[in-house]
Image (spheres, grey):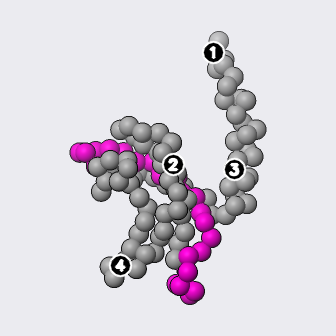
Amino acid sequence: MAETIDEISIDWKDENGQQLVKQVRKEVLTSGAWSTIMFMYQDLDKKTGGFGPKKIRVVRYQKRSGKYIPQSKFNISSAKQAKRITEIIQTWLPEMDEKVDSED
């Protein structure tokens, strides 16, 4: 387990040292006791021996006893899915800026 955000990676190797998941990019969205990090990564295609298409993973970590522990994750498995999520967020952003109405 990582002690700092800089140490957090989703690179993954098996017991023989073969890389199964390759981290391509990393962006810290929030940091603190609860941190959120977005990764671009590729999985090893065991049939071809090469890495497959790039995907995105958003991971939420909680820092407990000095270690960052993953609590939840969400994978975006295709560019099509990423584009659709982006479109929806863009349409929702103006509403997020609106003042919250108080209930009477």
Q: Which mark is residue 27?
A: 2
Residue at image coords 29%, 49%:
3
Q: Nearer the viewer, mark 1 or mark 2?
A: 2
Tell me which numbered mark, 1 or 2, is placed earlier along the sequence.
Answer: 2
Look at label 4 and name its amino acid: Gly
Q: Is residue 100 left or right of residue 1?
A: right
Q: Which residues are magenta?
A: 45-67
Q: Is residue 76 left or right of residue 10?
A: right
Whole-number angstrom distance, CA of label 3 to CA of label 1: 29 Å
Cβ–Cβ under 8 Å for marks 3 and 4:
no
Tell me which numbered mark, 3 or 4, is placed earlier along the sequence.
Answer: 4
Indicate the secondary structure of the residue bearing disc 4: loop
> Which image quarter is the C terminus in?
top right
Look at label 3 and name its amino acid: Ile
Single out the residue that lies furthest toward the bottom.
47
Q: Which mark is residue 85?
A: 3
Q: Which residue is mark 4?
A: 17
